[in-house]
Amino acid sequence: MKPYDTIVIGDINIDLVVAGCNDLPAPGQEVLVQNMTLHVGGGAALFSLALAKLGLKIAFNGILGEDGFGQFVRDKLIESGIDTRFIRKSTMNNTGISIAINPEKDRSFITYMGSNSELNLQQLDMNSVILGRHVHLTGYRGSQNHKEYMEMTNRLKSLGLTTSLDVGWDDTGEWYKGIFELMKQVDVFFMNEVEAQHYTGCSSAEESIAELSRHCRHIVVKLGSEGAVAAVDGQLMYRSGFEIPVVDTTGAGDSFNAGYIYGFLTGEQTEQCLLFANACGAMSVSQSGGSTGTPDRAALEHFIAEKVGHTTDIWEAAG
């Protein structure tokens, strides 16, 4: 038995959530807002918090600044039972900060990458990785670090570990086609509908999912409030989402990923993994902050028992 269910590698920062900011101030002006709250941010960190809340043992591998924000984040992870001993301290940058403006409507962000910009898989302590049975990766940046992700996923496979990766939004606009090569080496590959269409060049979700399933044994495409699709060995499964009042969508995709990987690591079938994922994503948006609304196992089961009668599997077919 290994001490950790999952080793998470990736971005970790502060999220400053600004609510009720309808207009940005002009030079020399001040705008009053409804509220500002401070949370742990970064896709990898939010995934870790959600998965730990579901009862799995997590160790985090990333970089924080030697500052008050870095200590705040570390303390929050420790409170959630996440092992932080593999988090390195930056001597060059402060902890990253992302300011989320008006998250209850169309979110806008002001982001300082900070210590996250130093993350490099080639500098990773492999002694941390072998302590887990699964590794979740974020931080892929196309041609900038494709080679190191190929090398790392190949090495993890040789060590007998399963892997998952959320590709995230490509803010460079490159949409690097080498990603199809990387997909072949990852056990569970996550992306959302818009990302899938950008990478494949297809005009619809159905076409892009079909194209992705040609390159990846296990692809999961998030469709927002509409639910999600998983394609495993060419077999497609769709599960619709849950209707729930939206407070803040920050971290919903990361909570979705955690729900899915929770099912994957506990041996559930694809349909059940999608159900867990959709429920975790829905519960996440019900409260402000990327991890505040994520459920523990009891809350997840209660939510599904109450809501599952209102969600329907639309189709299941061979690809």
Image (spheres, rainbow, N blue to C red):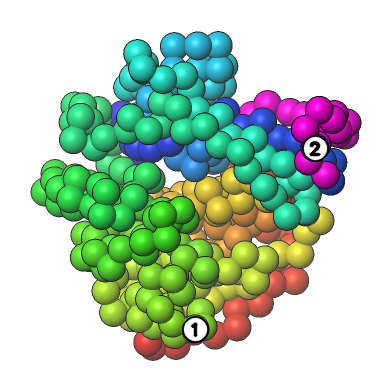
Where in the figure is residue 137, as x and y percent of width and height? 34, 45
| Residue occupying image coordinates x 67% and y 40% | 100
Q: Any magenta on residue 184? A: no
Extreme bottom residue here? 318
| Residue occupying image coordinates x 41% and y 26% | 115
Earlier along the polypeptide chain: callout 1 or callout 2? 2
Secondary structure type for disc 1: loop
Which residue corresponds to mark 2?
26
Where in the figure is residue 121, as x and y percent of width and height? 24, 37
Q: Can residue 86 be seen in this view?
A: yes
| Residue occupying image coordinates x 75% and y 71% | 310
How many numbered discs, if any? 2
Which residue corresponds to mark 1?
203
Look at the picture and state if 25 lies above or below 76.
below
Q: Quadrant of the C terminus?
A: bottom left
Q: Is residue 5 visible?
A: no
Q: Any magenta on residue 38? A: yes
Q: Do labels 1 and 2 touch, CB within 8 Å?
A: no
Q: Quadrant of the N terminus?
A: top left
- Magenta stretch bounds: 23-41
Quarter of the view holding residue 90 = top left
Secondary structure type for disc 2: loop
- Neighbours of disc 1 within 10 Å: few (<14), some (14-19), many (20+): few
Q: Which amino acid does label 1 sit on?
A: Ser
Q: How far apart are marks 1 and 2 (CA)?
A: 39 Å
Q: In the visual, does 128 lie left or right of 55? A: left
Look at the picture and state if 314 lies above or below 91.
below
Q: Which of marks 1 and 2 is in front?
A: 2
